[in-house]
Amino acid sequence: MQTAGEHKLPHFFHYPPYFTLQPVRETREKQIQLWKELILDYCRAHKIFVIGLEEDFPLFSNPAIERSLNHEAREAFLSALVLDGRAEWMDKSYRQCLILWHRIKDWADIILHFAKENGLEDSVMTVEEIRTGIESRGTDIHGMDRGVLMKALKLLENKGKLAIFKGTSTDDEGVKFSV
């Protein structure tokens, strides 16, 4: 089994037809499902949040079999993730895709668990402390995309679980947990 970095790649990654959109509906559905799972697993393992449709992305080519996904296949696989709520297009031209290896509601649950586990009830932290602080090391939260974090925090704010305080810059935005 080939690896991309430290990530083990599934057997289909070595099968040339899977780098071409399949014309038979049932085969294409299976192909899309396999690619969705691979993209999510890879992005989670490498903490990748954004995939550029026209940029080099390790999964979009396999030099060992001399195959690459064309633009149509890349867009089809990412669009399938968008339909599943596992990604969002970041622009109207569909060039950048935000990958949600956890859905926003799941990120919100992870953040809430993080706050409870670290005794942060009624505590104030900056958004940057949540993303990069000592408390978040070793968790999925550490190093997470700021946009994804803000969406999850706003969802929690709407549920009354925290309050977001605007600072003079994005570096000093604060969060007060009230879990």
Image: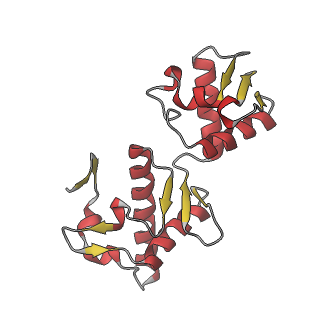
| Residue name at image x 74 percent, y 23 percent | 176
| Residue name at image x 23 percent, y 67 percent | 14
For the C terminus, the image quarter is top right
Relative vertical location of residue 86 with respect to residue 92 in this rendering, above or below: above
Horizontal side of residue 5 vs 23, given as left or right: left
In the rendered image, residue 118, in percent from the top left (x then y), is placed at 58, 16
How many tags in the picture?
Answer: 0
In the rendered image, residue 160, in percent from the top left (x then y), is placed at 81, 30
Q: Residue furthest bottom?
A: 23
In the rendered image, residue 167, in percent from the top left (x then y), is placed at 75, 31
For the N terminus, the image quarter is bottom left
Horizontal side of residue 17 vs 122, given as left or right: left
Horizontal side of residue 112 vs 134, given as left or right: right
Q: Nearer the viewer, residue 148 or 156?
A: 148
Relative vertical location of residue 144 with respect to residue 103 in this rendering, above or below: above
| Residue name at image x 33 percent, y 74 percent | 19
Relative vertical location of residue 51 with respect to residue 141 in this rendering, above or below: below
In the rendered image, residue 127, in percent from the top left (x then y), is placed at 64, 31
| Residue name at image x 56 percent, y 43 percent | 145
Relative vertical location of residue 86 with respect to residue 65 in this rendering, above or below: above
Q: Quadrant of residue 146?
A: top right
| Colour scheme in use | secondary structure
